[in-house]
Image (spheres, rainbow, N blue to C red):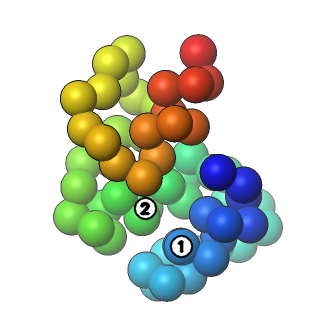
Amino acid sequence: MKLQEIRQIAMTWGVDAGVRRTKQDMIHDIQISEGYEPCFRTKDTCENECLWKKDCTNHR
């Protein structure tokens, strides 16, 4: 997912989407806002089907 798309989602959730924020930091804050564990790019495997899975599992 492109950074601009993530920024739009972040703003929808009231998450700081400032230029200096990293993709990972914004996604972690979005996950927390959604009530989930901030797990983006922190695990070797993922059992969940979330919005971030493609970017999360393709970084290795």
Disc 2 residue type (three-letter): Asp
Q: Percent x, y for residue 29?
A: 43, 62
Front-most of residues 51 and 17: 51
**Residues packed near mark 2 inside 10 Å, few (<14), some (14 to 19) or many (20 plus):** many
Q: Are marks 1 and 2 in contact (CB under 8 Å)?
A: yes
> Image point 42% across, 53% down: which residue?
51
Which numbered mark, 1 or 2, is in the foreground of this view?
A: 1
Local crowd size for mark 1, using a 10 Å CA cut-off: few (<14), some (14–19), many (≥20): many
Q: Is residue 23 left or right of residue 40?
A: right
CA distance separating discs 1 and 2: 8 Å
Looking at the image, residue 42 lies above or below residue 33: above
Query: SS for tag 1?
Result: helix
Q: Residue at x 61, y 24 (%)?
A: 59
The residue depicted at 51 percent of the width and 36 percent of the height is: 54
Numbered label attached to residue 37:
none
Q: Amino acid at mark 1?
A: Ala
Residue occupied by mark 1: 10
Q: Which residue is mark 2?
A: 29
In-front residue for pair 26/45:
45
Q: Is residue 16 above or below residue 6?
A: below
Q: Residue 19, position in %: x, y?
A: 78, 67
Residue 25, relative to residue 29: is it above or below?
above
Residue 43 image-quadrant placement: top left
> Disc 2 on helix, strand or loop?
helix
Q: Left of 36 or right of it: where is 45?
A: right
* Residue 55 to residue 2: above or below: above
Which image quadrant is residue 30 in? Answer: bottom left
